[in-house]
Amino acid sequence: MEQEEYDGYLECIEIREIRIRIKQKGFRTREIIVHTSLLDDSEYSKDDIAALFHRRWQAELNLRSLKTVMQMDHLRCKQPHRVRNEVRAHMIAYNLIRQVMSEAARGTGVQPWKISFKATMTTLTDLLPVGKRSVRLSVVGDFSAAGAAGFCFCLARGLFGLTISANRCGMRSCPAV
């Protein structure tokens, strides 16, 4: 950073501190502190900030599902076009699994973010016949059983009318603000 740019910044920034109580079933209620530059409390209420924080937390959980649960934290391909294909395959599998979760939630009247991604993926994997749990796709290299499960389940659902309930997917305890 150049000295001119540095000199152009403010010496201090005014922030607002908000205490938010997190209620999670089966856990103690805890309090977190959120700092924000949204200073106008009449325009941005404490509840609005809490709702935004909750949505951001859900986004973090979704990224964790992509990276760790679907084992996308380490891409196996080396060539750029194959890496793009691997990322696309993970995104397709992720969205298919989320679609199953959405339909399970809609069918049982539960919010979709209250259903565990990992439990849904495990359920889909368990629904596959034992010999079909590992799929080799020439375009992407080794494709995880979870991704194959999501794809195969959605295909089977379309062909054979299979359905899945939210209880089978596993209810996740999710922080409520």
Image (tube, grey):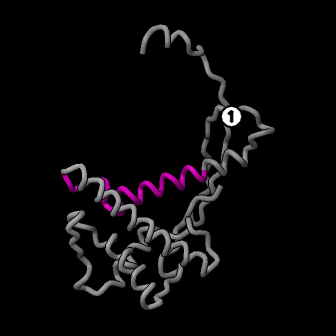
Q: Tag 1: Cα neighbours inside 10 Å, few (<14), some, or many (≥20)?
A: some
In percent of width and height, residue 70 lies at: 34, 63
Residue sitting farthest toward the bottom: 160
Q: Is residue 31 above or below residue 175?
A: above
Q: Identify the image quadrant of the C terminus.
A: bottom right
Q: Is 106 within the magenta? A: no
Q: Residue at x 54, y 72 (%)?
A: 102
Residue visible at 48% across and 75% down in the picture: 100
What is the tally of numbered marks visible in this picture? Answer: 1
- Residue 37: percent from the left, percent from the top? 65, 31
**What amino acid type should be assigned to the residue bearing mark 1?**
Leu
Judge from the rendering whether residue 44 lies leftward or rightward of residue 113; answer left or right.
right
Does residue 63 show up magenta in the picture? yes
* Magenta stretch bounds: 54-78
Judging depth in this view, the residue of 30 and 9 nearest the camera is 9
Label the magenta part by its dominant secondary structure. Answer: helix
- Locate the N terminus and report the quarter of the image it occupies: top left
Q: Is residue 41 left or right of residue 131?
A: right
Q: Please identify the quarter of the rendering in which residue 110 is found.
A: bottom right
Q: Residue at x 21, y 72 (%)?
A: 136
Q: Is residue 7 above or below residue 37?
A: above
Residue 162: x and y, percent? Answer: 46, 88
53 and 76: which is toward the camera:
76
21 to the left or right of 147 = right
Q: Is residue 138 left or right of residue 21?
A: left
Front-most of residues 148 and 80? 80
- Disc 1, SS: loop
Pointer 1: what residue? Answer: 38
Picture layout, residue 156 above or below residue 69: below
Q: Percent from the top left, x then y, of residue 113?
A: 56, 65
Please report the residue visible at 51 percent of the width from the left and 53 percent of the height from the top: 59
